[in-house]
Image: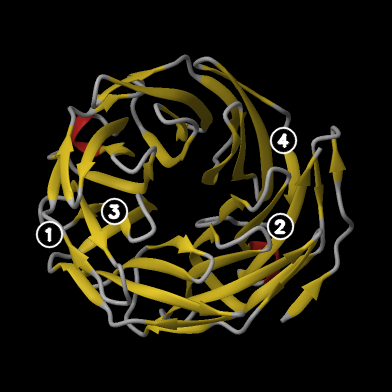
């Protein structure tokens, strides 16, 4: 793997960045990343030939390096999400003619795969997943075949074989763009998406889970202004999440709270960036701190959110790349202070690139 040596940056005493590492020396898109351990992460992405690949990233301080990428599908993929289940196991979910999932087994820095499992024969677009337990994953997705309605399913993978519970429709309205799906506990989850059937408004639906069965609540409009795109979400506590989204060139963030079993309420909005942002993603640091990323005006930026009750405040933008086009980047915290970002670097021929950072 090649290294792009750019100066470490220190901004507002909040974040320090190491040197970038190219893990895919060609175009990479739909990048997803999750934590395996305090020093390792798994990234999944689509390469320039349409193949889906996984790569293991190792972080030592602020240095990051990649193992060899291994292909998990040669079919053209429209979206990918990878969900870590343990230090040596993950589940990659992806879109093709069907919705697919494969168990990823990790040995050192080498991923290998179980048999591909189709959890729906319908064509799907956006997909997102989150671990409920060490062997179950909640998946939310846009069902293109069924009028682009938004659906969810629990996938079970106690070994290298995947099975699915019953699919539940969360929202009959058409959905599009990035979607988010997170587990708050082993029995509570939330999906966040743009409801094109209702003025493209940013919308959330909470779900309770029993085994592989889903009981969904009523979809709740998070922002009545409409045109809520580039939806990102991260769990904060057992009853709260933080969401980020774009509304007409305005990056917004809110705290969403689940009460009762599936009732969602939204805190006040924070407008933390303007322009035409892309690739908004979030990573939880602790109950009161979240790190966000977005690409605005061809600059890759991060932000540190501070949460007090249901109020979000943000730091100024902290640049990690001055030529990034983060169409499907992602970030994750590996410890209380160290995290990593994986992204499409538009300033370097759209290569798949990663960088480590430290808070404080």
Q: What's the CA distance linking mark 2 and mark 4?
A: 15 Å
Q: Residue 133's spot in the image, x, y percent? A: 36, 53
Q: For the residues marked 4 and 3, what is the alpha-carbon distance in whole angstroms?
A: 31 Å
| Residue 145: image tag | 1
Residue 322 appears in view: no
- In space, the residues marked 1 and 4 are separated at their CA atoms by 39 Å
Image side of residue 17 versus residue 311, left or right: right
Considering the numbered disc 3 on the image, is that residue within a helix, a strand or a loop?
Answer: strand
Query: Which residue is at a point 23% across and 36% down the rendered structure image?
Result: 207
Quick check: can you spot residue 57? yes
Question: Which residue lies under the disc numbered 2?
Answer: 323
Say which of marks 2 and 4 sits in front.
Answer: 4
Looking at the image, do the residues carrying marks 2 and 4 touch, with CB atoms under 8 Å apart? no
Q: Is residue 252 above or below residue 182?
A: above
Q: Which residue is mark 4?
A: 317
Point out residue 110 in the picture as x, y percentages from the top left corner.
56, 83
Assign a secondary structure to mark 2: loop
Q: Secondary structure at mark 4?
A: loop
| Circle nearer the N terminus (3, 2) | 3
Q: Residue at x 24, y 44 (%)?
A: 175
Alpha carbon separation for disc pair 2 and 1: 37 Å
Q: Specify whether 97 is left or right of 334.
A: left
């Amino acid at each position: 793997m090649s290294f792009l040596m750019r100066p470490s940056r220190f901004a507002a005493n909040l974040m320090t960045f190491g040197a970038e590492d190219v893990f895919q020396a060609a175009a990479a898109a739909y990048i997803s990343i999750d934590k395996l351990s305090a020093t390792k992460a798994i990234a999944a992405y689509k390469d320039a030939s349409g193949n889906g690949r996984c790569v293991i990233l190792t972080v030592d301080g602020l240095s990051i390096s990649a193992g060899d990428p291994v292909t998990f599908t040669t079919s053209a993929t429209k979206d990918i999400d990878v969900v870590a289940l343990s230090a040596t196991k993950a589940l990659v979910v992806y879109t093709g003619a069907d919705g697919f999932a494969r168990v990823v087994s990790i040995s050192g820095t080498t991923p290998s795969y179980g048999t591909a499992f189709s959890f729906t024969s319908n064509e799907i677009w956006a997909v997102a997943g989150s671990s409920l337990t060490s062997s179950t994953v909640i998946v939310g997705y846009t069902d293109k075949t069924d009028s682009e309605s938004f659906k969810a399913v629990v996938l079970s993978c106690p070994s290298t074989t995947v099975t699915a519970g019953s699919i539940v429709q969360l929202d009959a309205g058409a959905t599009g763009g990035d979607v988010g799906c997170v587990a708050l506990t082993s029995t509570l989850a939330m999906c966040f998406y743009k409801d094109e059937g209702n003025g493209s408004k940013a919308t959330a639906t909470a779900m309770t889970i029993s085994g592989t069965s889903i009981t969904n609540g009523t979809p709740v409009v998070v922002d009545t202004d409409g045109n809520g795109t580039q939806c990102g979400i991260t769990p904060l506590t057992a009853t709260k999440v933080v969401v980020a989204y774009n509304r007409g060139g305005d990056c917004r963030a809110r705290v969403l709270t689940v009460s009762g079993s599936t009732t969602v309420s939204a805190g006040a909005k924070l407008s933390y960036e303007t322009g035409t942002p892309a690739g908004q993603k979030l990573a939880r640091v602790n109950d009161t701190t979240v790190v966000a990323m977005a690409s605005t005006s061809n600059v890759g930026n991060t932000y540190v959110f501070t949460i007090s009750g249901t109020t979000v405040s943000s730091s100024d933008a902290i640049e990690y790349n001055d030529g990034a086009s983060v169409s499907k980047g992602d970030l994750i915290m590996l410890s209380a202070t160290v995290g990593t970002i994986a992204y499409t670097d538009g300033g370097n021929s759209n290569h798949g690139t990663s960088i480590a950072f430290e808070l404080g």
